[in-house]
Amino acid sequence: MSDEKKTSLESIGEFKLIDELTKDFKTHHSSTIYGVGDDAAVIQRDENTVSLVATDALLEGIHFNLMYTPLMHLGYKAVMVNLSDIYAMNGTAEQITVTIAASSRFPKEALEELYKGIKKACDIYEVDLIGGDTTSSVSGLMISVTAIGTAKKEDVVYRNTAKENELIVVTGDLGAAYMGLQILEREKSVYKANPNIQPDLDGYDYLLERQLKPEARKDVVKFLKELDVKPTSMIDVSDGLASELFHLCKQSNVGAQIYDEKLPIDTAVSTTAIDFEISPTTCVLNGGEDYELLFSIKQEDFDKIKGNPHMTVIGHFTAKDSGLYLIDKQGAAIELKAQGWNHFNEGKNA
Ligand code: ADP
Ligand code: MG
C-alpha cells in the first residue's frame, strides 16, 4: 500500500466494498453460472442440475455475545444462517463445511457444545457435515459455515428477475429476532450494573427463540413446489426487510410499494416494541435476523397463495422511477432507505 489517500471501511459500506473488491475478476469456467451478488453462487452440476454455494461467518463481539448466547444455540444458528441462503435460491441444502477459530479461553467442552447445536441442525434439516478447518484465534470465537445445495436449473430463483406489478410476499413474521436481541441486551446491562439481579426473561419466549434459535424456511421451498408457484425473485431476510427489498429493487431495476398495515408482526413484537419506545414497523424494516423469505410472484399466482398462513402479500413492484415506498396506515408514502445493519459501524447481524 502506498501513501495515497485511504478509504475507511465505515465510509464505503459493505455492499459497495464487495462490488469494488470483486469487479475485476473474470469468469474462467462456463460452469460458473452466477457468482457474486445473490444469496448463493450457482454452479452447473449436470445438464439440468446446479449446485448452490453460500458462506457466512459469525464472529464473537460482532454477531454474538457469549454472555447470553448458549454455544449450542450458536452452532445451530450458524448453520441456519447458511441454509437460509440456499433456500433463498429455491434450492435444497445437502452439505455443510464448518470452520472454527477459537482462543485459548475455550476448552474442548465448549466446542463440543457448539457442535451439539451444529449436529442438531444437520439432523433436523438433513444436511451432511463434510469437512471444515480448525484454527486458533488471538481472541474470541469465530464460526464460518459454507452450505452446499442443489436445484433443478430451471427452478433457481435469483434476486434480479422481479418485474413491475408482481406481488411482494414475505413468509412468517418479522421483527421478533430484533426485539429478542433488545431484551437480551437490556438484561445484560441490568446484570452488569448489579450481578445479584436475576435476568427477567419471562414471557419473552417467542422473541428469544427467534433471536437465539432461528429456523431457516426449508418448509417454504416445499410449500411453493406443492402450490406450483415459482417465485419471480427471492432473497432471505437477514438484514431487515428494507435492506432486502432494496436489493431486489436495485438488482431487478424496479421500484416497490409496501403497505404498513400488511406487514406481518407478532403481537409479542408490537407490545414489546412499544415498551421499548420503538415503532414495531421500524423493527420489521430495519431489525434483521428474521431468516424469513422475501419473494415476488406473478399476479395470476395470487389465488394459489391466498389465505396461506405462512405467506403474506405486503405490496407490489412498480416502475424503477417510482422509487421504494412504504404506505403508512394513514395512506402517506414514506420513502424507504436501506438501513440494514452495516457491519463496519453497527456490528450485530450476519
Ligand atoms: P447474504 O446476506 O445473502 O449472506 P452477503 O451480503 O453476505 O449475502 O453477500 C452478498 C454477495 O457478495 C454474495 O454473493 C457473497 O458471496 C458475496 N461476497 C461477500 N463477501 C465477499 C468477499 N469478501 N469476496 C467475494 N464475494 C463476497
Ligand atoms: Mg441471503
Image (cartoon, helix red, strand yellow):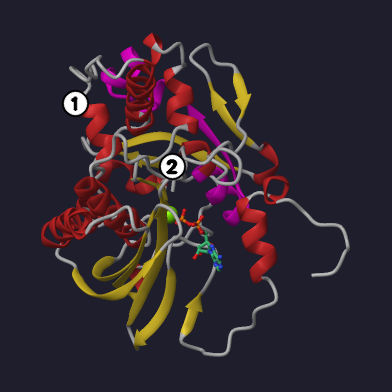
User: Farthest right residue?
Assistant: 4
What residue is pinned by disc 1? Answer: 205
Q: Position of residue 19 (x, y in %)?
A: 65, 63
Residue 153 lies left or right of residue 21; in this view the side is: left
Q: Position of residue 150 (x, y in %)?
A: 29, 73
Q: Residue 191 falls in which quadrant of the image?
A: top left
Q: Amino acid at mark 2?
A: Leu
Q: Is residue 176 magenta?
A: no
Q: Position of residue 312 (x, y in %)?
A: 32, 35
Q: Residue at x 54, y 68 (%)?
A: 36
Q: Is residue 267 magenta?
A: yes
Q: Earlier in the sequence, mark 2 or mark 1?
A: 2
Please name whichever residue, 103 or 189, is drawn nearer the observer in this view of the structure.
103
Count neighbours of disc 1 (C-alpha within 10 A) and say few if under 14, some if 14 to 19, many if 20 or more: few
Residue 269 lies left or right of residue 158; in this view the side is: left
Height in image: 133 above or below 126?
below
Could you tell me which secondary element the residue under label 1 belongs to?
Answer: helix
Height in image: 213 above or below 259?
below
Instruction: Give the prevailing secondary structure in the magenta stretch.
Output: helix
Q: Residue 268 falls in which quadrant of the image?
A: top left
Q: Nearer the viewer, mark 2 or mark 1?
A: 1
Instruction: Report the Cα–Cα distance between label 2 and label 1.
Output: 32 Å
User: Farthest front residue?
Assistant: 104
What residue is pinned by disc 2? Answer: 167
Q: Position of residue 41 (x, y in %)?
A: 45, 71
Q: Residue at x 60, y 46 (%)?
A: 344
Could you tell me which secondary element the residue under label 2 belongs to?
Answer: strand
The residues colored magenta run 244-272
Height in image: 111 above or below 46?
above
Count neighbours of disc 2 (C-alpha within 10 A) and say few if under 14, some if 14 to 19, many if 20 or more: many
